[in-house]
Amino acid sequence: MGHVISQLPRSTDPDLLVGTNTADDAAVYRLTDDLALVQSVDFFTPVVDDPYDFGRIAAANSLSDIYAMGATPLIALNIVGFPVDVLPIEQLVEILRGGADVARQAGMTIVGGHTIDDREPKYGLAVTGTVRPGSQVTNATARPGDSLVLTKPLGTGIIATAIKRGTAGTAAVEEATEVMATLNRDASLAALANGVTSMTDITGFGLLGHLLEMCKGSGVSAEIWVDALPWLRDARSLAEEGVVPGGTRRNLAFVEPDVEWVDDLPEYERLLLADAQTSGGLLIAVPSDRAEALIADLRGRGTPAAALVGRVGLVGERAISVRRGPAPGSS
Ligand code: CO
């Protein structure tokens, strides 16, 4: 929604510390000198067949923007669409149970919500969190020389498409489900403990789309190393077979004017880099001398991935350059 929201009138309220000016993850509103509200909302249609897992994934995804800001979630409201006369009500109960279980993991309470009759199920949360004013981490403060670290493997859009087509393998579905249902809380805590300069969560615009927002917001460029990226099981082979969602193709078309392909990549690999993610990991920028400690901390906390995937540079002709690995002499 960032692209549309940015066309609306901007607020001039001085207590709005983070709003729509920099396609950021959540809004931050100062209540007192010590306390700011962090607000975020997200919901979507099922990406997996199991209603309980869908509820877990949707809730983890809704909390992701809060963690990307370095904030702490407090309470949330359910947002539900459900075909009341078509599907058994037990499925709705399972969706909400999945959401409640993930909320509990996050130390947060779901305090209510709203359900409408809808042809296709939809679920998500409106989350309220808090942060100390000035301590929020945005996607607009990366600095040249920073390292880029990714905390979940990529490819959920491709796996979800294989699920819809009935061609996904059981092991791939199980892995993707657990990765999507994993909170970004531990990744966020590790980032905060290791000198994060900027971060964002990887969701609908894919790795390249969210990185582009970080580059534009921060006034920097970035380099991505394809061979360093972590992938979900089967994601690469499915992409090579053409199992690619429409959103991923749109993402690639959107970012390509800002991307220099330094090494020649086949189209399926370019699509993999743009794959629209559901409940993806955090992309964390840290000073390069902190990257090793951050990765060790992420591993210690058991995040689904802890990969050094690129670095931030001075603003260049193109915002993003994609290489197989680090440019010679650059790291
Ligand atoms: Co986000």
Image (spheres, rainbow, N blue to C red):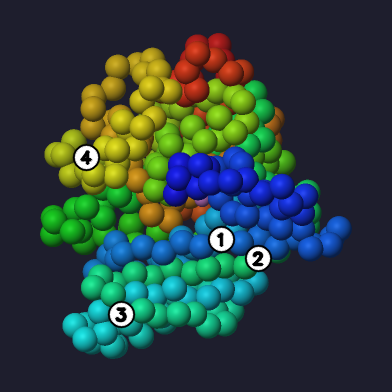
The residue wearing badge 3 is: 117
Q: Amino acid at mark 2?
A: Gly
Q: Is residue 263 visible?
A: yes
- In space, the residues marked 3 and 2 are separated at their CA atoms by 28 Å
Q: Is residue 325 above or below residue 128?
A: above
- In space, the residues marked 3 and 4 are separated at their CA atoms by 35 Å
Cβ atoms under marks 1 and 3 closer than 8 Å: no
Q: Where's residue 192, x and y in %?
A: 69, 49
Of helix, strand and loop, which one carries label 2? strand
Rendered residue at 56%/35% (across/down): 214
Total marks in image: 4
- Picture disc at residue 239: 4
- In space, the residues marked 2 and 1 are separated at their CA atoms by 9 Å
- Picture disc at residue 40: 1
Q: Is mark 4 within 8 Å of ligand 1?
A: no
Mark sitting earlier along the chain (3/4) = 3
Left or right of 275? Residue 299 is right
Cβ atoms under marks 2 and 1 closer than 8 Å: yes
Q: Amino acid at mark 4?
A: Ala
